[in-house]
Image (cartoon, grey):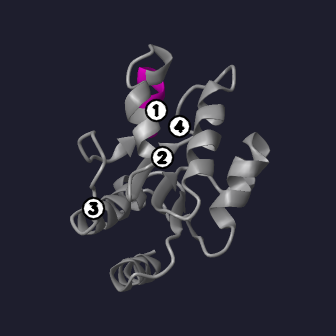
Amino acid sequence: MVNESERFIKDFESGSQPRWISLLGTSGNGKTMCGTHLWRRLSRRANWTGCDFFRETIYWPNLIDELRSTQSFEKYIELKRWPILFVDDIFAERDPNGFAVDKLNCLLGSRIGKWTIITANSTVSEIEKVDRRIASRLVRKPNVCVVNMAMDYAFRE
């Protein structure tokens, strides 16, 4: 995870073609911590001209709750334009009617060719069972998908 993260930073700083890094795997193994580090480092260097909302990491379950209550729709639209986006914990929300998957698919579709960081406590095959389009986008070149199935740090001795 660290090697791919370092390469992601170097590519961003060198002006390479934008891509995504998806950090997938078991809970508690450092995906969010790594994603947050990447976000902090890259968001300071990004060109935020034309973006109205405060730059922040996006915890996907909270954003879905806000969207369900009709709040934050403008923010959701704005995320499609951000030069760098960190979406944490996709597929962690309850989604009985497919609303969250639809919103995620739409957001990710608009992020093709933009720097994006994604985390999930799922594997690609688990995501594929929910939505094949999203799974395909996570692994599509030039994007990088890192799967870490290490044991939760809280349970290590």
Say which label, 4 or 1, has the lower sequence index: 1
Q: Position of residue 25 (x, y in %)?
A: 56, 58
Q: Nearer the viewer, mark 4 or mark 3?
A: 3
For the residues bearing labels 2 and 4, Cβ distance under 8 angstroms:
no
Do residues under tags 4 and 1 come within 8 Å of each other at their CB atoms? yes
Q: Quadrant of residue 53?
A: top left
Comparing labels 2 and 3, the label whose residue is closer to the camera: 2
Mark found first going from the N terminus, 3 or 1: 3
* Residue 61 inside the magenta-drawn segment: yes
Say which amino acid is labelled 4: Ala
Mark 4–mark 1 Cα distance, whole angstroms, equals 6 Å
Which portion, as a residue range, is magenta?
A: 60-66
Q: Three-letter amino acid code at disc 2? A: Lys
| Side of 96 where 10 appears, left or right | left
**x%, y% of residue 130?**
74, 40
Amino acid type at mark 3: Ser
The answer to whether residue 22 of the structure is visible from this angle is yes
Q: Is residue 73 above or below residue 78?
A: above
Q: CA distance from mark 4 to mark 3?
A: 24 Å
Q: Tell me the residue at 74%/55% (across/down).
A: 125
Residue 73 is one of the magenta-drawn residues: no
User: Earlier along the polypeptide chain: callout 2 or callout 4?
Assistant: 2
Packing grade of label 2 (10 A; few <14, some 14-19, many >=20) is: some
- The C terminus is located in which quarter? bottom left
Q: Amino acid at mark 1?
A: Pro
Residue at the image position 55 percent from the left and 65 percent from the top: 113
Which dot marks residue 80? 2
Q: Residue furthest front?
A: 50
**SS at mark 2?**
loop
**Mark 2 → mark 1, Cα distance in angstroms:** 17 Å
- Mark 1 is surrounded, within 10 Å at the Cα level, by few (under 14), some (14 to 19) or many (20 or more) other residues, namely some
- Tell me, for residue 43, which label it has, or none: 3
